[in-house]
């Protein structure tokens, strides 16, 4: 299993409120992208706290033998992190209203479990193509789902960034979880909306399947988002389920 991660402030924002974590233990890899939101620097606090807490939690995991155990573990820890963030915001006026999106993948040799809240996404790239395996918890996506607007209209909707769920903003939160199998050479792309809002699925797929190292692919994705405006922070994690020897230059960004 190979991984690479990269986060970038973009070309417009003064601060990077995205946080990324990729952690390994005897179970496998836990990869997370968190896109923070809130008052001045509060988004940084929410996303950084989320990554830091999960790092400590993942270090304590001894085994997750099947998808059911992984899904249960992820839901329990999300609830714990949500409570921690919410309490922190209530007790620190500067952090009032802070929250973060969350997309995380537990990747083992036999299964992968993905959980998400908000509009950070997970995509699967394999021999069958490229598809989004999470569904945004956003106002615009609900309008698309209900048939009130088209996908094309959603791309330019004035309330595109309104989220219906976020981690830490409420006392309780619902997380969507799903488990899939990954074959050798399949890959996962986790990203914040700073990437998915600037690149089409066709552009992401083409880059992911290009004859480059994982590091070059990650940098190419971020560079393309910046070339298309870079109005938001941009974060990517790529997990490649492969025993193939990495190409020269494959190291974490």
Image (cartoon, rainbow, N blue to C red):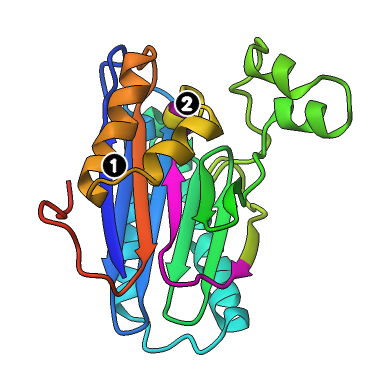
Circle 1 crowding by C-alpha within 10 Å: few under 14, some 14–19, many from 20: many
Badge 1 vs badge 2, beta-carbon distance below 8 Å: no
Q: Secondary structure at mark 1?
A: helix
Q: Is residue 227 above or below residue 141?
A: above
Residue found at the very far left of the displayed protein: 248
Q: Which residues are magenta?
A: 179-194
Residue 187 occupies which quadrant of the picture? bottom left
Q: Nearer the viewer, residue 198 or 103?
A: 198
Circle 2 crowding by C-alpha within 10 Å: few under 14, some 14–19, many from 20: some
Q: Residue at x 56, y 59 (%)?
A: 115
Q: Nearer the viewer, residue 193 or 76?
A: 193
Q: x, y (%) of residue 80?
A: 50, 63
Provide the residue designation for mark 1.
217
Real-space Cα distance between discs 1 and 2?
A: 14 Å
Residue 6 occupies which quadrant of the picture? top left
Report if residue 201 is visible in the image.
yes
Q: Residue at x 55, y 61 (%)?
A: 114
Q: Nearer the viewer, residue 47 or 66?
A: 66
Q: Is residue 182 above or below residue 84?
A: below
Report if residue 91 is visible in the image.
no
Q: x, y (%) of residue 66?
A: 56, 86
* In magenta segment, residue 45: no
Q: Residue at x 43, y 30 (%)?
A: 195
Q: x, y (%) of residue 221?
A: 34, 33
Provide the residue designation for mark 2.
199
Q: Secondary structure at mark 2?
A: loop
Q: Earlier in the sequence, mark 1 or mark 2?
A: 2
């Amino acid at each position: 299993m190979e991984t690479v991660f990269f986060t970038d402030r973009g070309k417009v924002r003064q601060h990077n409120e995205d946080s990324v974590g990729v952690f390994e233990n005897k179970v496998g890899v836990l990869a997370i992208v968190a896109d923070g939101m809130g008052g001045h620097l509060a988004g940084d606090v929410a996303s950084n706290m989320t990554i830091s807490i999960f790092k400590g939690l993942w270090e304590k995991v001894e085994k997750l033998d099947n998808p059911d155990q992984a899904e249960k573990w992820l839901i329990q820890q999300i609830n714990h992190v949500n409570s921690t963030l919410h309490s922190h915001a209530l007790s620190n006026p500067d952090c009032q209203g802070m929250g973060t999106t969350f997309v995380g993948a537990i990747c083992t040799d036999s299964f992968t479990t993905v959980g998400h809240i908000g509009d950070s996404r997970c995509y699967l790239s394999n021999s069958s193509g490229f598809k989004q395996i999470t569904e945004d918890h956003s106002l615009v996506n609900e309008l698309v789902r209900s048939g009130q607007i088209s996908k094309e209209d959603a791309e330019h909707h004035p309330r595109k960034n309104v989220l219906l769920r976020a981690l830490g903003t409420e006392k309780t939160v619902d997380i969507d979880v799903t488990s899939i199998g990954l074959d050798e050479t399949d890959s996962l792309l986790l990203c914040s909306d700073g990437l998915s809002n600037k690149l089409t699925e066709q552009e992401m797929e083409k880059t992911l399947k290009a004859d480059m190292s994982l590091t070059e692919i990650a940098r190419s994705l971020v560079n393309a988002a910046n070339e298309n405006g870079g109005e938001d922070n941009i974060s990517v994690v790529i997990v490649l389920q492969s025993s193939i020897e990495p190409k020269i230059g494959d190291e974490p960004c």
